[in-house]
Image: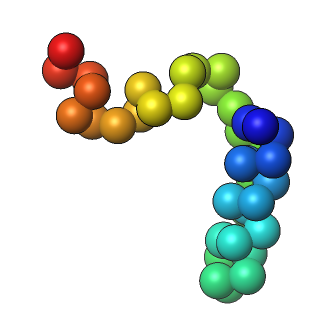
Amino acid sequence: MRKDIKQQAAEMLEAAGFKNVNEFDKGSTLGLGIHEMMHL
């Protein structure tokens, strides 16, 4: 799932005109990047 998400995100950014898009994966659990969840 992660691989597909980052691939699709890169494709969307490139379609929007962004250049030099690089995929990366920090290995964190999905959903933990939501700032409201960081204060628990």
Quick check: can you spot residue 19? Answer: no
Q: Is residue 29 left or right of residue 2?
A: left
Q: Height in image: 39 above or below 1?
A: above
**On the rendered image, what quadrant is the C terminus found in?**
top left
Quick check: can you spot residue 32? Answer: yes
Q: Would you identify the image quadrant in which residue 8 lies?
A: bottom right
Colour theme: rainbow
Q: Is residue 23 left or right of residue 28?
A: right
Q: Would you identify the image quadrant in which residue 36 lies?
A: top left
Find residue 20 and report its horizontal and vertical position in percent.
75, 65
Task: Give the total of numbered labels.
Answer: 0
What residue is at 27 percent from the left and 36 percent from the top? 35
What residue is at 27 percent from the left and 27 percent from the top? 37
**On the rendered image, what quadrant is the N terminus found in?**
top right
Q: Nearer the viewer, residue 27 or 40?
A: 40
Q: Nearer the viewer, residue 23 or 9?
A: 9
Q: Would you identify the image quadrant in which residue 28 lies?
A: top right
Residue farthest along the front direction in this orientation: 1
Q: Is residue 4 left or right of residue 28?
A: right
Q: Nearer the viewer, residue 32 or 19?
A: 32
What residue is at 72 percent from the left and 48 percent from the top? 5
Find residue 27 and report its horizontal and vertical position in percent.
65, 21
What residue is at 66 percent from the left and 71 percent from the top? 13
Q: Is residue 28 left or right of residue 38?
A: right
Q: Nearer the viewer, residue 16 or 18?
A: 16
